[in-house]
Image (spheres, helix red, strand yellow):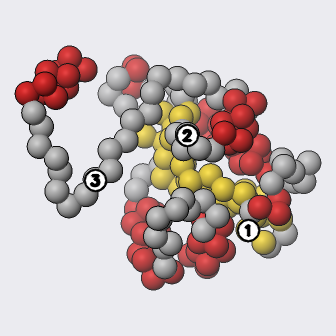
Amino acid sequence: MVSVDIRAAQRPDLDQILSLYADLEMPGDKPSDLSAAENLFVRIQQYPNYTVYVALAGDVIIGAFSLLIMDNLAHGGAPSGIVEDVVVHRNWRGLGVGKQMMRFAMEQCRQANCYKLSLSSNLQRTAAHQFYEALGFQRHGYSFMVPISQELPPINDSDRDIAVLAL
């Protein structure tokens, strides 16, 4: 296993981070441009407990992920962690980089007294699912998403009944 340093991302890291995220893109995804990423990075830095991290081999960024530790009114007020956008450079996969990044995220959550760390993974990424399960992540419930477009579809009466039952 190769040893990496993990630290909070900085503005000069964005070029390398965007290059890594290009590997995550699914067909039809629009790549981010540097100017837009810089604006988003400034916004992200203003969120409390939301950090983009990078994994380094020397001074080269070989992995990245985002971690949000959010407060909760439920669960006795215990916060929870959400990890997103996990990526390791294709030449460094299988060398323990991702494992170190996820252990780092778990430790950040443990120190923040989180009751859980969760993530979602595209159904097509079966190798990623095996990776997360090997780290102790468990499949829990369902992950749902709805694409948000300019115009939302109308809600019919049967949809309202389902939504009320879900509450």
Mark closer to the chain start, 1 or 2: 1
Mark closer to the chain start, 1 or 3: 1
Image quadrant where residue 5 sits: bottom right
Q: Amino acid at mark 3?
A: Ile
Q: Toward the viewer: 58 or 111?
A: 58
Residue 40 in sight from this viewpoint: yes
Instruction: Name the residue beneath numbered marker 2.
Output: 123
Left or right: 72 with respect to 79?
Answer: left
Label 1 to label 2: alpha-carbon separation: 27 Å
The residue positioned 75% from the left and 30% from the top of the image is 134
Q: Name the residue at the left extreme.
A: 157
The residue positioned 45% from the left and 27% from the top of the image is 142
Asked whether disc 3 touches disc 2, contact meaning CB atoms under 8 Å apart, the reply is: no
Label 1 to label 3: alpha-carbon separation: 32 Å
Instruction: Name the residue beneath numbered marker 1.
Output: 61
Residue 112 in sight from this viewpoint: no
What is the secondary structure assignment of the residue under circle 3?
loop
What is the secondary structure assignment of the residue under circle 1?
strand
What is the secondary structure assignment of the residue under circle 2?
loop
Instruction: Name the residue beneath numbered marker 3.
Output: 148
Q: Amino acid at mark 2?
A: Leu
